[in-house]
Every structure is written in C-alpha cells, then in structure tokens.
Image (cartoon, rainbow, N blue to C red):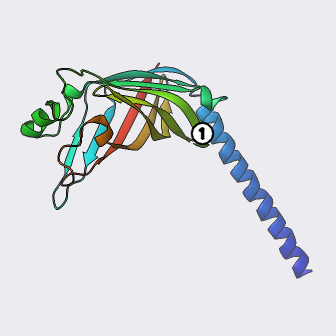
Amino acid sequence: MKLRLSLGCLSIISTVATAVALNAASASASQFSSAAGRYRIDPESRIGFSIAQVAGPGINGRFPDISGRFDIDADHPAQSFVEITLNPASVKTGQERIDNFLRSSAVFNVTDYRQITFHSSRVVQEGPTSALIEGVLTAKGVSRTETFHATFVEQKPGSVAFHVTGTIFRVPYGMGIGIPLYSNAVVFDMDLKGIK
C-alpha cells in the first residue's frame, strides 16, 4: 500500500512538474511572440566596449551616437533583422587623450570613415528568449562577418529591450596598434532598447 501511494505521489509530482515547465515555456514563447514588430533603436541605448591590457586597467568606453532598427518575427526568427549604425567620433572613455587617439587615423580614422555599421544576415533562436545574430560589420572600410548573442530582457508598451554581447578582433579592421600590450579582442556589451 505504501509503495502504491509513493508511486502515485511520484506520478502526481511528475505531472505537476511537467505542467509547470510547459506553462513556463509557453509563457516565454507568448511573451516573445507579443514583441513581434518593427522597432527603431532608442538613442538612449548603450553600446559599451572593453579592451584588456597586460598589467593595466585596459580601455573601457562607449559609443553614445547610435541609430538603427530591428524587426522581430517571433514565428520565423530567421526572418528577423538587425541594423545598427554608430558614429566612431562619439567614442567616450572618460579620458580625452584616449578619445582623441581612438578617433585618429591609427584607429577609427573618423575623418575618412564616419560610420561603423552592422547588418544582420542570419538570426538563429537559441532558446525561448535568446538568439545568435550573424551579420556583416563594416568598420574603416573593411567588411567582415561577425556574430553576437542577444537575450530578450523585457517588454513594455511600445518598446522592447535586449542585452547583446560579442567579441570582435581589431587587427582585420586595420586597428591593431598597441598589440600585444593591448588585446586584439574587443569585447562588446550592449543594452539595446527598441521603440515602435
């Protein structure tokens, strides 16, 4: 009798756990589905970056001047689209000397190249609220395929927010000055808000 009761309890627990998991997955899916649509990137979004330094603090900065749009197709994620444009002359590190150096011909060369752009070519959903975004990054006249990871953060009336991360190597873009003292890898950490 005790064995049957235990098996019965296990069966009930298993059924409840399955139902909770399905409801959670359904809630995540429906939440993401309700975010479908076309958005423009809020200028208040944050694109931050960091470059590690051997035995030093490295460089941490952001690009305040950004624009772009993204389309979310919840039913067909592969048809979603991201387009971002940033102005490298707007770079801010909190140190004017470094800002001026980054704007110079040794790095961004903002006199000849006024924009850095990213256009997605493929979006692959990795989980209920996350996706891999592959596309073409163009900087300093060089275009290369790069990959970022996006996580759905929240949805409010008329807006959605994502946290996006990725690592770009700067040598292929002609910005390798300072290696090996400064890392070749630029780590991006972004909070992107879309507004309908």
Which residue is pictured at 67% across the width and 29% down the height?
Answer: 75
Residue 125: x percent and y percent? 60, 39
Residue 85: x percent and y percent? 34, 23
Question: As rendered, which of 6 and 183 lies closer to the eye?
Answer: 183
Q: Is residue 60 above or below residue 108?
A: below
Q: Which residue is mark 1?
A: 125
Label 1 Cα crowd, 10 Å radius (few <14 / some 14-19 / many 20+): some
In the rendered image, which quarter is residue 101 located in?
top left
Question: As rendered, which of 15 and 43 lies closer to the eye?
Answer: 43
In the rendered image, which quarter is residue 107 located in?
top left
The quarter of the image holding the N terminus is bottom right
Residue 71: x percent and y percent? 53, 23
Q: How many marks?
A: 1
Which residue is pictured at 73% across the width and 58% down the height?
Answer: 17
Q: Is residue 87 above or below residue 18?
A: above
Residue 57: x percent and y percent? 17, 55
Which residue is pictured at 88% across the width and 81% down the height?
Answer: 2
Three-letter code, disc 1: Gln
Query: In this orientation, does residue 109 appear?
Result: yes
Residue 97 shown left or right of residue 77 in the figure: left
Instruction: Label 1, secondary structure: give it.
Output: strand
Q: Is residue 23 above or below residue 118?
A: below
Residue 29 shown left or right of residue 4 in the figure: left
